[in-house]
Image (tube, grey):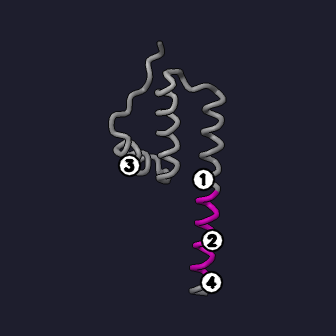
Amino acid sequence: MSQALNIPDTHKVIERLKRDANLSESAAKAIIDTIEEARLRDEPATKVDLAQLEIRLMRMMITQFVATVGTLAALYAMFA
């Protein structure tokens, strides 16, 4: 039996990831969900699990980047 990571207060961990790692809430939740899923399976995360998490995080980061660029373009258009 593998020793799984136990996260008793996921909300607190999500808030810490948002604050300390500058992650969005959805990215922080994706990390916690992946850890919880691995814990529930009582198996360590595999390379495939980590690759899937990386893909999900990259998609979220790209989405955030596009939203930021759009917001900055709108602000520039308003004040230019």
* Sooner in the amino-acid sequence: mark 2 or mark 3: 3
Mark 2 against mark 4, which lies toward the viewer? 2
Question: Gap between marks 2 and 4, in whole Å?
Answer: 10 Å
Q: Alpha-carbon neighbours of circle 2 within 10 Å: few (<14), some, or many (≥20)?
A: few
Q: CA distance from mark 4 to mark 1?
A: 24 Å
Residue 77, disc: 4
Residue 71: in magenta span: yes
At x 36%, y 45%, the residue is: 11
Measure the alpha-carbon separation of dots 3 and 4.
33 Å
**What's under tag 4, amino acid-wise?**
Ala
Seen in the picture, residue 69 relative to 32 is either above or below; the reply is below
> Which residue occupies 62% across, 45% down?
56
For marks 2 and 1 on the same chain, the one whose residue lies earlier in the sequence: 1
Q: Pointer 3 and pointer 4: residues touching (CB < 8 Å)?
A: no
> What is the number of callouts on the image?
4
- What range is drawn magenta here? 63-77
Q: Residue at x 47, y 27 (%)?
A: 39
Screen quadrant of the C terminus: bottom right
Q: Mark 1 = which residue?
A: 61
Circle 3: element type: helix
C-alpha distance separating marks 2 and 3: 26 Å
Instruction: Please report contact status of discs 2 and 3: CB closer than 8 Å, yes or no.
Output: no
Badge 4 or badge 1: first in the primary sequence: 1
x and y percentages locating residue 6 in the rendered image: 38, 28
* Residue carrying label 2: 70
Type of amino acid at the residue the image marks with label 2: Gly
Instruction: Give the residue number, with chain letter if any, for mark 3.
Output: 15
Given residues 72 and 11, the one toward you in this image is 11
Q: How far across and how far down the image is residue 46, in percent?
A: 61, 25
